[in-house]
C-alpha cells in the first residue's frame, strides 16, 4: 500500500524549496524505489489568507492521517498584523502540539566541502557532527498563562509561563540517550538550573535518566555556557538535549557553524504507537520563510531535501536511500555548486531549481 505523505509548503521560500522535494519524490516513485502518495495543504500565512486560520481543520486531519508530514516554512511581514492566535507560526505550533511531536532532532553536520563557508575557522568545524535534541511540545512555548494585560496606567504586563513536568523531561532525555548510543555516546543536557525552577527539575530528571545509561557519558551544562561553547569548540559535543526555547536558539547557532541556516534539516517525532510502533512525524528545515529572498529563486533547498532524507530514514526505514540522498547533497557540494548563502568567494552561484536538479541527477546516477 502506498505510504502517505502530506506536504505543507507554507509561505515564502517554503513553496520554492518544496518543489525540489516533489521532484525527488516523483523520481523515486517512477523508479519503483518508493510508493509514496502525496497530497498538499496550506499552512501559515497562505492558510490564513484562504481560510482565516493558520491551518484548516481539514488539513489538520490530513496531517494526523499521514505517515509523514513534510513542512516548508511559514511567516512573513505580510501577516505581521494578524491576530496573535491566527499568526502563521500558530499553524506550525498546532501541528507540533496536536501530533504530539515532542522530540525535535536537529543535526548540524559540516559537509567537508563547506568547511570554509562557516563563520568559524576550518579546524574548529571540519568533521563537525552534532545533534541537538530539542523538546518541542512543552516549556514556555505552550505554558499558561500567556497573556498581555493592560494595567490601566499606561503600562502593560506580558506573561509567558515556562512549565515542565517530570514525564516530559524524562522522555526527551531518553530520546537523546538512545540516539547517543548510535553515535559517540555523549550527551550534554543544557538548562538554567541556576536561575529557573524548571531548570532544577530538568537537571534532576536528566541525572536520574542518565543512571539508566551508565555506558553514555553524561554532562550537565548551563545553557548560556552551551551557547558560548558551541562557537568556541563545537566538536566537544555529540548530542545536546535541551528545552523548547533553548533548543530553538542553540540550533540556529549550530546551523551557522555548518555554513548557513539553509543547510540544517530537522525531524519532529512523536512517541511510537503502542500497537503499530509507528511514530507521527513532521520533517522541516530549521530555517524560516526568508522573506528577504522569497520569490527570487535563490533559496538553498538543501535543508529541505535533507529533511526529506530524515523522513526516509526515520518514518520509512529507507536508510540506504536516505544515505544516498545525503551523499548526493555532499557530492554536489564537493563539485563546487553553491547557492548564494553558502558561496565563500566570488564564485558563480546557482538558484534553487539548479541546485535541486543537480542533487536529483547525482541521486539518479
Ligand atoms: P529565516 O530563517 O526566515 O531567515 C534568516 C536569514 O537566513 C535570512 O537572511 C534568510 O534569507 C536566510 N535563509 C534562511 N533560509 C535560507 C535558505 N534556505 N537559503 C538561503 N538563505 C536562507 O528567519 P527570520 O528572517 O528570522 O524569519 C522570517 C519568518 O520566518 C518569520 O515570520 C519567522 O517567524 C518565520 N520562521 C519560520 C520557521 C518555520 O516555519 N519553521 C522557522 C524560523 C522562522
Ligand atoms: C523553528 C522556528 C519556530 C520555533 C517558529 C516559527 C514558531 O523558529 O522551528 O525553529 O520557534 O520553534
Ligand atoms: Mn527557530
Image: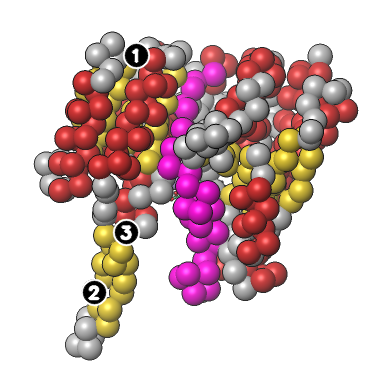
Residue 255 picture location, percent across and down: 46, 33
Q: Is residue 2 above or below residue 158?
A: above
Quarter-of-image position of residue 175: top left
Quick check: is 163 in the magenta stretch? no
Eye-nearest disc, 3 or 2: 3
Quarter-of-image position of residue 326: top right
312 to the left or right of 101: right
> Looking at the image, is mark 1 or mark 3 earlier in the sequence?
3
Residue 264 picture location, percent across and down: 52, 33
- Please report contact status of discs 2 and 1: CB closer than 8 Å, yes or no: no
Give the Cα separation between the discs numbered 3 and 2: 16 Å
Identify the residue shown where x is 83% and y is 29%: 29
Residue closest to the eye, 50 or 287: 50
Q: Which residue is mark 1?
A: 185
Q: How many marks?
A: 3
Quarter in which the C terminus is drawn: top right
Give the Cα separation between the discs numbered 2 and 1: 44 Å
Give the Cα separation between the discs numbered 1 and 3: 32 Å
Q: Which residue is mark 2?
A: 157
- Please report contact status of discs 1 and 3: CB closer than 8 Å, yes or no: no
Q: Which residue is mark 3?
A: 143
Amino acid at each position: 500500500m502506498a505510504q502517505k505523505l502530506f506536504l505543507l509548503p507554507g509561505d515564502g521560500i517554503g513553496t520554492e524549496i518544496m518543489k525540489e522535494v516533489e521532484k525527488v519524490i516523483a523520481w523515486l516513485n517512477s523508479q519503483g524505489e518508493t510508493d509514496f502518495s502525496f497530497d498538499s495543504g496550506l499552512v501559515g500565512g497562505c492558510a490564513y489568507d484562504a481560510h482565516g486560520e493558520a491551518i484548516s481543520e481539514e488539513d489538520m486531519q490530513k496531517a494526523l492521517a499521514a505517515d509523514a508530514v513534510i513542512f516548508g516554512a511559514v511567516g512573513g511581514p505580510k501577516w505581521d498584523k494578524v491576530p496573535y492566535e491566527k499568526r502563521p507560526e500558530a499553524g506550525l505550533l498546532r501541528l507540533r502540539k496536536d501530533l504530539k511531536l515532542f522530540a525535535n532532532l536537529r543535526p548540524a553536520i559540516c559537509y567537508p566541502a563547506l568547511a570554509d563557508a562557516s563563520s568559524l575557522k576550518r579546524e574548529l568545524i571540519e568533521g563537525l557532527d552534532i545533534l541537538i535534541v530539542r523538546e518541542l511540545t512543552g516549556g514556555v512555548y505552550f505554558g499558561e498563562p500567556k497573556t498581555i494585560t493592560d494595567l490601566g496606567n499606561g503600562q502593560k504586563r506580558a506573561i509567558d509561563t515556562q512549565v515542565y513536568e517530570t514525564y516530559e523531561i524524562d522522555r526527551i532525555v531518553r530520546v537523546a540517550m538512545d540516539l547517543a548510543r548510535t553515535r559517540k555516546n555523549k550527551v550534554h543536557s543544557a538548562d538554567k538550573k541556576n536561575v529557573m525552577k524548571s531548570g532544577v527539575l530538568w537537571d534532576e530528571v536528566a541525572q536520574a535518566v542518565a543512571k539508566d545509561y551508565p555506558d553514555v557519558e553524561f554532562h550537565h551544562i548551563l545553557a548560556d555556557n552551551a551557547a558560548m561553547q558551541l562557537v568556541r569548540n563545537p566538536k566537544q559535543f555529540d548530542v545536546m538535549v535541551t528545552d523548547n526555547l533553548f533548543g530553538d536558539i542553540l540550533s540556529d547557532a549550530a546551523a551557522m557553524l555548518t555554513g548557513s541556516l539553509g543547510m540544517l534539516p530537522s525531524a519532529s517525532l512523536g512517541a511510537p504507537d503502542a500497537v503499530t510502533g509507528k511514530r507521527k512525524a513532521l520533517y522541516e528545515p530549521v530555517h524560516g520563510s526568508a522573506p528577504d529572498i522569497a520569490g527570487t529563486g535563490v533559496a538553498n533547498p538543501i535543508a529541505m531535501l535533507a529533511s526529506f532524507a530524515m523522513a526516509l530514514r526515520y518514518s520509512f526505514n529507507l536508510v540506504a536511500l536516505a544515505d544516498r540522498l545525503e551523499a548526493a547533497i555532499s557530492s554536489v557540494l564537493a563539485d563546487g555548486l553553491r547557492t548564494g548563502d553558502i558561496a565563500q568567494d566570488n564564485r558563480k552561484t546557482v538558484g534553487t531549481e539548479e541546485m535541486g536538479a543537480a542533487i536529483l541527477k547525482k541521486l539518479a546516477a
